[in-house]
Amino acid sequence: MRPFALNYARPTQDVEVSTPYTYDSALQLNVLPDGGVAALDYAVLREFGATTSTAGSKTHFDD
């Protein structure tokens, strides 16, 4: 028996997204190219909605 949802599920398309920040493992923060904290840059927050990374998901099972 096939689950109902699989009859209507569509494969996701990979979307290329580039963000103006990178994760700095030493600071454990997302930082901008100039070294500033991405979470304090309101323009970045307005454009991207958040500055989350996947680091917590890899270390905590309940994230």
Image (spheres, rainbow, N blue to C red):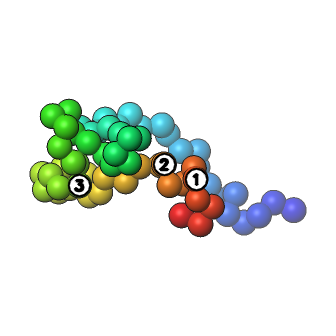
State which tag comes first along the sequence, 3 or 1.
3
Q: Residue sitting at 38 percent across and 48 percent down?
A: 28
Discs 2, 3 touching: Cβ within 8 Å: no
Q: Which residue is mark 3?
A: 39
The dot on residue 59 is 1
Under mark 1, the amino acid is Thr
Q: Identity of the amino acid at label 2?
A: Ala
SS type, badge 3 = helix
Residue 43 position, x and y percent, is 12, 51
Q: Disc 1 vs disc 2: Cβ atoms closer than 8 Å?
A: yes
Task: Tell me what residue is drawn at x 47 percent, y 49 percent.
Answer: 54
Residue 24 picture location, percent across and down: 35, 39
How many numbered marks, from 0 up? 3
Q: Which residue is mark 2?
A: 55
- Tell which circle, 2 or 3, labels the residue nearer the N-terminal end: 3
Name the image quarter holding the N terminus: bottom right
Expressed as whole percent of the image width and height from the top left, the position of residue 33 reads 20, 33
Q: Which sits in the foreground, 35 or 39?
A: 35
Q: Is residue 48 left or right of residue 10?
A: left
Compute the Cα span from label 1 to label 2. 7 Å
Dot 2: few (<14), some (14–19), or many (≥20) neighbours within 10 Å?
A: few
Q: Amino acid at mark 3?
A: Ala
* x then y, percent, for residue 25: 41, 41
Placement of 53 over or under 5, stated as above or below: above
Residue 13 in sight: yes
Question: At 37% from the left edge and 53% from the top edge, which residue is drawn?
Answer: 52
